[in-house]
Image: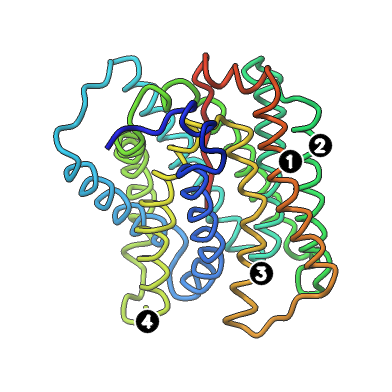
């Protein structure tokens, strides 16, 4: 299969890369509920360790199915390993402790700040330059997302969730850093290979951290809900979605890939409506329309501009994201 390039993505407008990113945010939207359900039966560290082992095995199988692993230069291998510690170990430890202490709605809302954090960090480092129209799209998408979450009374912030909210905000900052620093190496390395290397580096520390909890875990109390959450999160939300996300990073660039995360809470709300009977208010529908418009505006603004788009193409600007 020939790799999808930036030129290919531009030629077809809404490309296979965009489709992959939409599939990713659907998976991640459902994943919030799956995680919350599983954490009722599993210790957070145990949950992380088991799902990342599953994800690593999934990625290894996918990589093997593609044939021989390409050779990676030593400096790129070292950078991918460090990215694995940052984006898989540190991020996931902070995130799982945060979501265990707050609601899925709070977590999804706070994580929606990631595109803005990515854009700010990339701009501060001189790695990206978004035209004004693209900035307007990011602002519209974030504003629409806030409206979606604020319009439903069940999504209001609660003081008791402050510690979890702060942990989720910290995890969003870590993920933004991963997204920016993944930059050129993701553009130079096939997505499956790059993602597998980061998982091989990041999973062992998660397992070591979980060893005391693994010994204390009551495995008999883990039911179908817990195992489904682990399997869905490990195989799909991490194993499959990370590949799609990193492919988007390498092709579309950091800020414009990250803005897709704004739609994840919309999917989460829709999934809750289907499975939990929650109903959307008119304000939430308006917010969803704003999110979709913001994504479209950001993409068109970024492609029309000469700054960020050229920087992505020449410097290999690349990032990543998830739960």
Q: Which residue lies most toward the bottom here?
A: 277
User: Mark 2, residues whose alpha carbon is within 10 Å: few (<14), some, or many (≥20)?
Assistant: some
Q: Residue at x 36, y 38 (%)?
A: 195
Please say if 292 is above or below 138.
below
Q: Pick whichever of labels 4 and 2 is earlier in the sequence.
A: 2
Q: Pick whichever of labels 4 and 3 is earlier in the sequence.
A: 4
The residue to which callout 2 is attached is 136
The residue to which callout 4 is attached is 223
**Contact (Cβ within 8 Å) of mark 4 with mark 3:** no
Q: Secondary structure at mark 1?
A: helix
Q: Pick whichever of labels 2 and 1 is earlier in the sequence.
A: 2
Q: Residue at x 44, y 42 (%)?
A: 88
**Contact (Cβ within 8 Å) of mark 1 with mark 3:** no
Q: Which of label 2 and label 1 is nearer to you?
A: 1
x and y percentages locating residue 320 in the rendered image: 51, 38
The residue to which callout 1 is attached is 297
x and y percentages locating residue 50 in the rendered image: 33, 59
Mark pair 4, 2: CA separation: 46 Å
Q: Residue at x 31, y 39 (%)?
A: 192
Mark pair 2, 3: CA separation: 24 Å
Which quadrant would residue 235 be assigned to in this image? bottom left
Q: Secondary structure at mark 4?
A: loop
Mark pair 1, 3: CA separation: 23 Å
Q: Secondary structure at mark 3?
A: helix
User: Mark 4, residues whose alpha carbon is within 10 Å: few (<14), some, or many (≥20)?
Assistant: few
**Contact (Cβ within 8 Å) of mark 2 with mark 1:** yes
Q: Secondary structure at mark 2?
A: helix
Most foreground residue, 253 or 209: 253
């Amino acid at each position: 299969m020939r790799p999808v390039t930036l030129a290919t993505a531009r030629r077809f407008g809404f490309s296979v890369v965009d489709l992959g990113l939409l599939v990713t945010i659907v998976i991640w939207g459902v994943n919030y509920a799956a995680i919350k359900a599983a954490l009722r039966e599993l210790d957070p560290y145990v949950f992380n360790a088991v799902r990342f082992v599953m994800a690593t095995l999934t990625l290894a199988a996918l990589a093997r199915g593609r044939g021989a692993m390409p050779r990676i230069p030593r400096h790129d291998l070292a950078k991918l390993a460090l990215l694995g510690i940052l984006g898989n170990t540190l991020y996931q430890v902070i995130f799982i402790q945060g979501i265990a202490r707050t609601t899925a709605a709070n977590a999804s809302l706070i994580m929606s700040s990631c595109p803005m954090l990515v854009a700010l960090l990339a701009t501060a480092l001189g790695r990206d330059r978004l035209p004004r129209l693209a900035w307007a799209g990011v602002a519209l998408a974030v504003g629409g997302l806030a409206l979606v979450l604020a319009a439903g009374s069940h999504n209001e912030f609660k003081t008791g969730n402050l510690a979890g909210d702060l942990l989720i905000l910290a995890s969003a900052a870590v993920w933004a850093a991963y997204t920016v620093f993944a930059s050129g190496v993701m553009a130079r390395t096939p997505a499956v290979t790059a993602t597998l290397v980061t998982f091989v580096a990041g999973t062992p520390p998660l397992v070591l951290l979980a060893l005391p909890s693994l010994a204390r875990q009551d495995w008999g109390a883990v039911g179908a809900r817990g195992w489904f959450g682990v399997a869905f999160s490990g195989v799909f939300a991490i194993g499959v979605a990370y590949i799609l996300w990193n492919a988007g990073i390498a092709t579309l660039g950091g800020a414009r890939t990250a803005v897709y995360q704004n739609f994840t809470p919309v999917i989460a709300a829709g999934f809750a409506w289907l499975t939990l009977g929650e109903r959307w208010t008119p304000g939430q529908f308006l917010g969803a329309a704003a999110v979709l418009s913001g994504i479209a505006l950001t993409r068109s603004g970024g492609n029309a501009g000469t700054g960020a788009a050229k920087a992505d193409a020449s410097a290999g600007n690349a990032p990543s994201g998830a739960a």
